[in-house]
Amino acid sequence: MEASKQARAESESTYFRAFHEATRSGDPAKSATAVMRWLDRYDAAPGPTTFGAFAADADDPTLDRQAAALDQTLYGPSAKSAGKAWSAGGFYDTVAKARKSRRDPAGTLAPLNPRDRD
């Protein structure tokens, strides 16, 4: 029982919910930290996970704009005024859309009984 609780606590979906909560707070620093923690669970590929790679795979200009606005909000020279360009809700929505499309790229289920094509 304890192992299943631990597995659930460390699951991709748990970290995605934490990312959602961080964006609901509207805090850009919390949102940035939470999205990176989630990406560590989402992308099982070896090596460091980058948001840039995730965004490139998504091929969504809205996600690119939101990520750039978040970077500007956090690290730009006029971070206080740049925060108006970043939208916590918009950022969450575009990440959620990219997550869904990457999990189910065709929008359909795989065949139940695939046949080998020799």
Image (cartoon, rainbow, N blue to C red):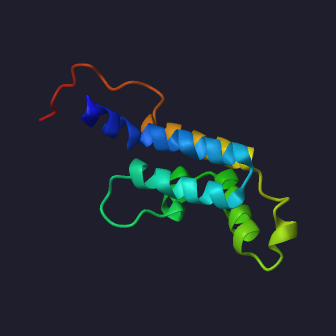
In the current view of this chain or complex, which residue is farthest to the left?
A: 118
Residue that sits furthest to the top in the current view: 112
Choose top left, top right, bottom left or bottom right for residue 85.
bottom right
Q: Is residue 4 above or below residue 28?
A: above
Locate residue 27, reporting x and y percent: 72, 55
Viewer-proximal residue, 109 or 3?
3
Query: Which residue occupies 32% across, 39% down?
Result: 6
116, above or below 113, in the image: below
**For the point 44% across and 34% down, which residue is it?**
104
* The C terminus - image quarter: top left
Residue 49 in view of the camera: yes
Q: Which residue is situated farthest in the bottom direction here?
A: 77
Q: Is there any visible trace of residue 64 in the rendered image?
A: no
Q: Position of residue 74 (x, y in %)?
A: 71, 69
Q: Is residue 92 left or right of residue 6?
A: right
| 32 sits to left or right of 73 | left
Q: Give residue 1's position: percent from left, percent from top.
A: 26, 28
The reply, left or right, for residue 45 in relation to residue 13 is left
Q: Position of residue 19 (x, y in %)?
A: 58, 46
User: Count the marks: how many?
Assistant: 0
